Image: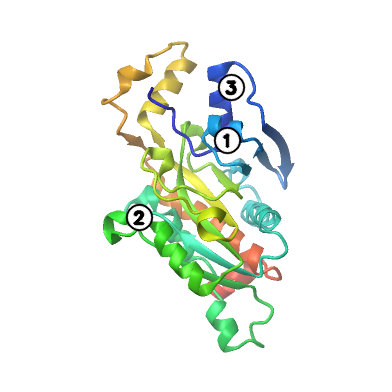
Amino acid sequence: MLSRRSDLAMEARRIWTEDNRSEPEGVEESVESRLGFEVTTVAVTGDRAAEELCKPKGRYVTVELGRFLRREDDSFEAGVRVIADILLSLLGENAGTVMVAGLGNPSITPDAVGHLVVKDTLVTRHLRRQMPEAFAQFGDLSALEPGVMGTTGVESVDVVGAVVREVKPDALIAVDALASRSMDRVCRTVQIADSGIVPGSGVGNARGALSRETLGIPVIALGVPTVVDAATLTLDVAREAGVELDPEALRGKSGNCIVTPREIDSQVRTISRLMAYGINLAVHRGLTVRDVDLFLG
């Protein structure tokens, strides 16, 4: 059967509910408002639920960016604070040293999220070692871009794993572009999860997983949906119109196509900056958004 692809746990839960007309066991969902942003938390607690939703067990927190996209007053700082607070809650107090892995292909705009986030990450590992007293108030943050196997010939998990073994961070934040089932969530939501990440899974090109099991440290996945699988979009638009299509009829037609907005270049840059600043405030806990602006120049 042609699957409806999505990296978002909240969408995976709703797809399963629509298809089975019941709630999956071992899944809990809650919705709250933080600084004017709607935040949905999906907790996948059971092995069967993880298998049914095709999501590893863990917590998946989705932030709706409506307030930020409407450019309301102080929405950037508020959005950064929300992302930072969620990252802190998932990292825990024991994550003294953190590494950011910017996944994806910077040459392809919808897949450049990881690259753009690394560009705005305030890395300090080297500075803390060279001038420990001057940078004592900063967190210990490092970053790398492993590239994609098509250009390096090496799986991202192998590159990241080798660096993790050498640097020995307490935790890893893996940043990547995601796939959604709905254009309404493309570049309009951010998902943060403590389950790790399988790069490319949302578009049917899954690579090796970055997780606690493969790397030996906690892995927080941070991502924004930038594309929709064409077959998934077709099925959902038809269903909204009251038309049921045979998924198999789409195989080989739209199944290999990906849809992205016309304004993807500016949207990816804007949201990547929001995510990067969230990481900076989560790791460098005494800084403000203005401080980060100053240090990044």
Identify which amino acid the numbered label 2 is placed on. Asn
Could you tell whether 231 is left or right of 133 in the image?
left
Q: Earlier in the sequence, mark 3 or mark 2?
A: 3
Q: Secondary structure at mark 3?
A: helix
Q: x, y (%) of residue 138? A: 65, 76
Q: Earlier in the sequence, mark 1 or mark 2?
A: 1
Identify which amino acid the numbered label 3 is placed on. Thr
Figure quadrant of residue 158: bottom left
Q: x, y (%) of residue 64? A: 61, 41
Q: Marks 3 and 2, Cα distance to the nearest angstrom?
A: 34 Å
Residue on which the image places disc 1: 50
Residue on which the image places disc 2: 105
Q: Earlier in the sequence, mark 1 or mark 3?
A: 3
Q: x, y (%) of residue 274? A: 56, 56
Q: Quadrant of the N terminus?
A: top left
Query: Who's the residue at 49% across and 74% down the image?
Result: 166
Q: x, y (%) of residue 100? A: 52, 63
Q: Marks 1 and 3, Cα distance to the nearest angstrom?
A: 14 Å
Figure quadrant of residue 156: bottom left
Q: Nearer the viewer, mark 1 or mark 2?
A: 1
